[in-house]
Amino acid sequence: MINNPIDATEDDIVWIKSTHKKRQELLFNTKAKLIYTDTKWSDDERLKVVDNPKLEICKLMQGLDCGDRLDMVRVGSCFKVGTNTVIGGEGFGFAKDGDKWIRMPHIGRVIIGDNVEIGSNCTIDRGCLDNTIIGNGVKIDNMCHIAHSCKIGDNTIITAGVIFSGSVTVGKNVWIAPNSTIKNGITIGDNAFIGIGSNVIKDVPEGATVYGNPARAQ
């Protein structure tokens, strides 16, 4: 099982929402052997229609052995971290089962590259199904939150108070100004600039500069 269908192998199970704007692209590119979804929107034989795809994945994961919790974080050389920062904790993920919420087990890890600095009072959650990855040379200021399964490219700067929802992909050499919030599943291209206090709810192209609420190109 894996979060991102694009990264899936022939041994993986994924889910793709019928409302996902890139569902056809994901379906075409994924190698997953089984794909949970909520309505039939393709004749692909790998699609399995269920009422709640996320809940089905959650149930499958309940019995998995997550291994040694102490081996959930891997860091590279020249790593620096501030006080009261937590790396590798379980992310905030739940699936609705009737009138109650079921916690989604998080079995991924946090992989941190070389020459990374992380400030004080930050949280970096381990991945849900795949890993949370912090690339080489990334610098993260104080009071930042990076949710499960995010991918941060090399030499990106994340300044104070930035919040990433789950499964955000950030390219290389990106600058994210203070108090910005990034919606789950968003992709930010290489060399992009996110202005102060921006709410990013759409993908940001390579080299773009965006500001505002919602964030727009300038």
Image (cartoon, rainbow, N blue to C red):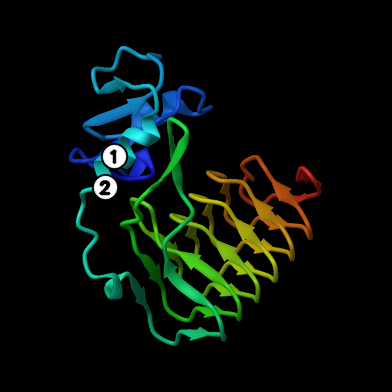
Q: On the image, numbered disc 2 is attached to which residue?
A: 62
The structure residue drawn at horizontal position 65% and vertical position 40%, both measured from the top left corner, is 202
Q: Identify which amino acid the numbered label 1 is placed on.
A: Lys
Q: Nearer the viewer, residue 94 or 197?
A: 94
- Tally of numbered discs: 2
Q: On the image, numbered disc 1 is attached to which residue?
A: 59
Q: Is residue 36 above or below residue 118?
A: above
Residue found at the far front of this picture: 99
Q: Identify which amino acid the numbered label 2 is placed on.
A: Gln
Q: Say the numbered circle drawn on residue 19.
A: none
Residue 42 at least partly seen? yes
The structure residue drawn at horizontal position 40% and vertical position 62%, both measured from the top left corner, is 126
Residue neighbourhood size for the residue with mark 1, other residues' Cα within 10 Å, grouped as few (<14), some (14–19), many (≥20):
some
The structure residue drawn at horizontal position 34% and vertical position 64%, both measured from the top left corner, is 109
Q: Secondary structure at mark 2?
A: loop
Residue neighbourhood size for the residue with mark 2, other residues' Cα within 10 Å, grouped as few (<14), some (14–19), many (≥20):
some
Figure quadrant of the N terminus? top left
Task: Residue 134 in the image: state x and y as whole percent.
Answer: 46, 67
Task: Residue 18 in the image: state x and y as whole percent.
Answer: 46, 22
The structure residue drawn at horizontal position 58% and vertical position 75%, both measured from the top left corner, is 139
Residue 154 at least partly seen? no
Task: Residue 146 in the image: state x and y as whole percent.
Answer: 54, 62
Disc 2 and disc 1 in contact, CB within 8 angstroms: yes
Distance between mark 2 and mark 1 Cα atoms: 5 Å
Q: Quadrant of residue 214?
A: top right
Q: Is residue 148 above or below residue 20?
A: below
On screen, residue 106 versus residue 118, left or right, reads left
Q: Quadrant of residue 161?
A: bottom right
Task: Residue 187 in the image: state x and y as whole percent.
Answer: 55, 46
On screen, residue 184 versus residue 101, left or right, reads right
Q: Nearer the viewer, residue 99 or 2?
A: 99
Q: Secondary structure at mark 1?
A: helix
